[in-house]
Image: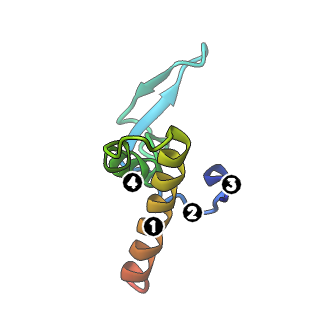
Amino acid sequence: MDDPSHKADMGGPAFPVPMTMDDKGNFHHSAEHPDNIGGMTLWDYYAAAALPAFIAHPGCPPEEWAESAAAQADAMLAERAKRTEGQS
């Protein structure tokens, strides 16, 4: 399985939130800098949304939950790309 952190397109932010970082490295919400977007990626959101379905199967090891949720997130992004191709 591919490492999702190396994927070129993670779907962008799932819940985009303008962020700034102070001189101590702390992030803060900021309407002043809308180009600085924070939040989890859409890939992370899709994987998290799929996870409960896999956890519900007793006897399935957690490693398989993670692999299955990651595969589901990959599939969701691929389908989303097909459906939004050519739309702007």
Residue of label 2: 9
Q: Real-space Cα distance between discs 1 and 2?
A: 9 Å
The N terminus - image quarter: bottom right
The kind of residue on which mark 3 rests is His
The kind of residue on which mark 4 rests is Tyr
| Colour convention of the picture | rainbow
Q: Which mark is residue 66?
A: none
Circles 1 and 4: CB atoms closer than 8 Å: yes
The answer to whether 40 is drawn above or below residue 21 in the figure is: below
What residue is drawn where x is 44% and y is 61%? 72
For disc 1, the neighbor class at 10 Å (few under 14, some 14 to 19, many from 20) is: some
The kind of residue on which mark 2 rests is Asp
The kind of residue on which mark 1 rests is Leu
**Left or right side of 25 for 18:** left
Return the disc, 4 or 3, that comes first in the chain's sequence: 3
Q: Which mark is residue 77?
A: 1
- In this rendering, does residue 23 appear at all? yes
Q: Real-space Cα distance between discs 3 and 1?
A: 15 Å
Callout 3 secondary element: helix
Q: Which mark is residue 6?
A: 3
The answer to whether 63 is drawn above or below residue 25 in the figure is: below
Residue of label 4: 46
Question: Which is more toward the observer, 19 or 44?
Answer: 44
Instruction: Name, please, the residue furthest toward the front.
Output: 59
Question: Which is more toward the observer, 50 or 78?
Answer: 50
Q: Nearer the viewer, mark 2 or mark 4?
A: 4
Q: Real-space Cα distance between discs 1 and 4?
A: 8 Å
